[in-house]
Image (cartoon, rainbow, N blue to C red):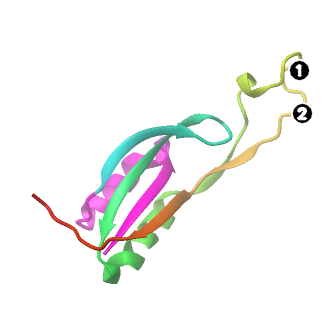
Amino acid sequence: MKLLITIVQDQDVPNLLEALAEEEFGATRLSSTGGFLRTGNTTLLIGVAKEKLDQVLDLIKKVCKKREQAPSSALLPFGKARGSGLRKVVVGGAIIFMVEIERFEKI
């Protein structure tokens, strides 16, 4: 069994949770913040049998798409004019850490 620690943007979470539920995969949702743009994201803990790992990874790839987003003015260095030198950055997708689970119990 594997534990997927999956970090996705908040806007992708509802669709991902729905897709996982449709395929009868459970997930535990944890609110988190981070990344270059300091925007909200969500960490999902997903336990999955090894033989279903590819199926879950395909769902994540299908739902969590990368897109461009401009940084907010809050990230500008002090004294910089708005709009000067702001470049869009690629956000979205997912970051997935896979951990081998030695034992799993549901009580």
Boundaries of the magenta span:
1-26
The correct choice, above or below, for 47 with respect to 33 in the image is below
Compared across the picture, whether 92 is left or right of 62 comes to right
Compared across the picture, whether 95 is left or right of 14 comes to right
Label 1: which residue? Answer: 80
Label 2: which residue? Answer: 85
On the image, the x and y values in percent for residue 101 come to 32, 71
Q: Which residue occupies the extreme top position in the image?
A: 79
On the image, the x and y values in percent for residue 77 come to 83, 24
* Count of numbered labels shown in the rendering: 2
Query: Could you classify mark 1 by the number of other residues whose Cα lies within 10 Å: few (under 14), some (14-19), or many (20 or more)?
Result: few
Sequence order check, earlier mark of 1 and 2: 1
Type of amino acid at the residue the image marks with label 1: Lys
Real-space CA distance between mark 1 and mark 2, rounded to the nearest whole angstrom: 9 Å
The C terminus sits in image quarter: bottom left
At x 30%, y 51%, the residue is 28
Query: Could you classify mark 2 by the number of other residues whose Cα lies within 10 Å: few (under 14), some (14-19), or many (20 or more)?
Result: few
Q: Which residue occupies the extreme front position in the image?
A: 102
**In this view of the protein, which residue sits in the foreground, 103 or 52?**
103
Type of amino acid at the residue the image marks with label 2: Gly
At x 24%, y 71%, the residue is 103
